[in-house]
Image (tube, rainbow, N blue to C red):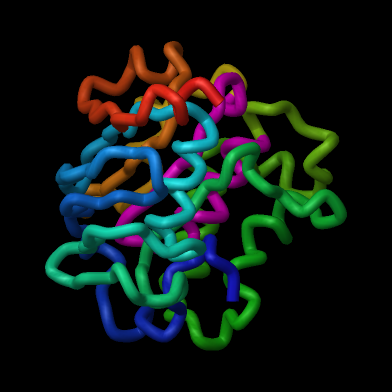
Amino acid sequence: MSAWCATLGAFSQRSPEVRVTLRLRALVAVPGTGPVTLDVPAGTLAALVAPPRFGTAVARVLVGLAAPVTGRILVGDRDVTALPPPRRQIGYVPAGGALLPQLSVRRNIEYGQRKRERVHEVADDWTTTVVDRLELALSLTLLPHQISAAQRFRVALARAAACLPEVLVVDLPAGSAGDSRLADLMPRLSPPEAPGVAVLVCTADPATLAEIPVRHELVTEPSEATR
């Protein structure tokens, strides 16, 4: 099952309006980095400031694609540190978006929902809403190489948001969002009645950081940071 999507079996048991806080407790994602303790409340956009390879490593640990050295990851009151990706309910936008080049924009967005019969019908309605909010409706039949970098980033966001995650982790190298502004896009990723998704952006891009007031700098050992 795709790591981009929250667990499908939980859709019929919870409301899409429920959003929770991401909590990291003394998390050491990879050797050579210091512990991270932070809270990202629902509806908040926060940044973990880290060199690209460390940002990617932390993002992969948060979504369950790698195990941490030590520490805990909580989504609301749930400790998800040892859970597989589908059970974490954490959406993921990998570095560069990781769109499948042979699939249309529509099929890329729907890729994480291949077992759509398990998804509560609200997920279909919400996918349509996200596509409209991110202004992708006219691009649905195109392939990734036929759209701009900013549009590809929006497609990756739509793919993650369509799965109704409680938390969204974005691995964002410099320039990969094109001319998109995160502060403008993030409010479009949750229903209007909801407090919003907790969003953590792993980046060292100055342009991105300039629009994110809540930041936590990842401490790295000097020998590691210069590699």
* In this rendering, position of residue 139 left or right of residue 35: right
Count how many numbered circles sit on residues in the image. Answer: 0
Q: Residue at x 77, y 54 (%)?
A: 100
Q: Position of residue 89 (x, y in %)?
A: 36, 67
Viewer-proximal residue among 194 and 210: 210
Residues drawn in magenta: 152-177
In the rendered image, residue 84, in percent from the top left (x then y), is placed at 43, 76
20 vs 132: above or below: below
Q: Residue at x 45, y 25 (%)?
A: 223
Residue 110 horizontal/vertical position (percent): 64, 64
Measured as percent of width and height from the top left, residue 14 is found at 26, 78
Residue in the image at 50% along x and 66% along y: 5
> Is 60 displayed left or right of 192 in the figure?
right
Residue 30 covered by magenta stretch: no
Q: Quadrant for the N terminus, please.
A: bottom right
Say above or below: 43 vs 223: below
